[in-house]
Amino acid sequence: MNTATGSDDPRDYLRDQGFDSYTEQDHATWRTLARRQREILQGRIAGAFLEGLDALGIGETGIPDFRVLNDRLKVATGWEVVAVPGLIPDLAFFRLLADRKFPAGFWIRKPEQLDYIEEPDVFHDVFGHVPLIMQPVYADYLQAYGKAGLQAAEHGALKRLARLYWYTVEFGLAQTQQGLRIVGAGIASSPSETVFALESPSPNRVRFDLARVMRTLYRIDDFQETYFVLDGTEAWPTLDLDKLIPIWKRLEGLDDLEPGQLLADDVVLARGDGSYHRDHKRPAA
Ligand code: HBI
Ligand code: FE
């Protein structure tokens, strides 16, 4: 994962969203992305995500005003969106989450970068991440993730937490009675990965297992080779430290797993044929 270096004090990164500085073109970019994504997400995303979008008033009129989002978020789950310039260092990021503050980039991609950006912008962060923060179990999971991150830093286990975040918050799927649904923000904000993650024969889809996920390398610059599937859209794992620390200890003696690797005791929901990545060879992080 990209890492930012610098101060660990989150206050050093907080900015005003500068809502009045967005241009008409910025709002038009949002509208293009939001319209396309809403359409493609129908029947593919967790119902709670669409409910969150509606309850927050995140729509197709333009970039949301964080002050409006926060009035609604605070009432629902006590969370708040705060504006940051881009990626911030891990510790500053964890501290914000532990304090129920979600850092969101306030800038928006240029029209010529609609499908690929390297740093999170306001569309990825707000459209992709914030709707599920209206859901109490998810709100608690994110806060627990922040607290666990601060502990992981002291135990030399940061990479374990980064993998967990990647395979749940960013690229998670969930099994529901209606079928497989997206819960990860990295998928939910990408039209091509929305279709790939659910419908391509290429990736593996494996039942989520906390220790297994924290052992697994991931791809930062291409579709995932394996998606992990929660047992329902509210099945976010509890992250008690007395559960995590023994797992980190046990994993110290074990090799990392390659992104596409399957284990004998994985619960494999769909074994991928690997067709996509055979033609897109790239190293894993
Ligand atoms: N900073 N703004 C921002 N957004 C992120 O998602 C983010 C970050 N810094 C670090 C980070 N994510 C990851 O390394 C976390 O897993 C810690
Ligand atoms: Fe993200």
Image (tube, rainbow, N blue to C red):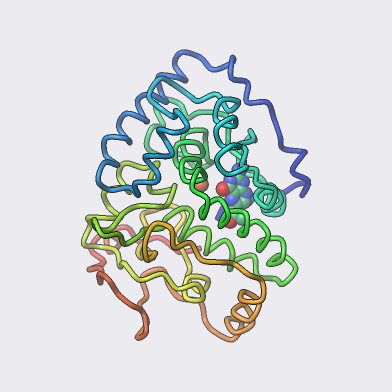
Image quadrant assignment for residue 88: top right
Q: Nearer the viewer, residue 277 or 229?
A: 229
Residue 95 screen position, x and y as percent: 71, 51
Residue 118 screen position, x and y as percent: 50, 42
Would you place residue 107 above or below residue 273 in this image? above
Residue 39 falls left or right of residue 253? left
- Tell me what residue is drawn at x 35 percent, y 77 percent: 262
Would you place residue 108 above or below residue 166 in this image? above
- Quadrant position of the N terminus in the picture: bottom right
Would you place residue 61 above or below residue 50 in this image? above
Q: Nearer the viewer, residue 100 or 218?
A: 100
Residue 283 screen position, x and y as percent: 44, 63
- Tell me what residue is drawn at x 54 percent, y 17 percent: 22
Image quadrant assignment for residue 174: bottom left
Residue 180 screen position, x and y as percent: 28, 58
- Tell me what residue is drawn at x 51 percent, y 76 percent: 211
Mark count: 0
Q: Nearer the viewer, residue 87 or 125?
A: 125
- Tell me what residue is drawn at x 55 percent, y 24 percent: 65
Residue 95 falls left or right of residue 60? right
User: In this view, which residue lies farthest toward the front?
Assistant: 75
Image quadrant assignment for residue 111: top left
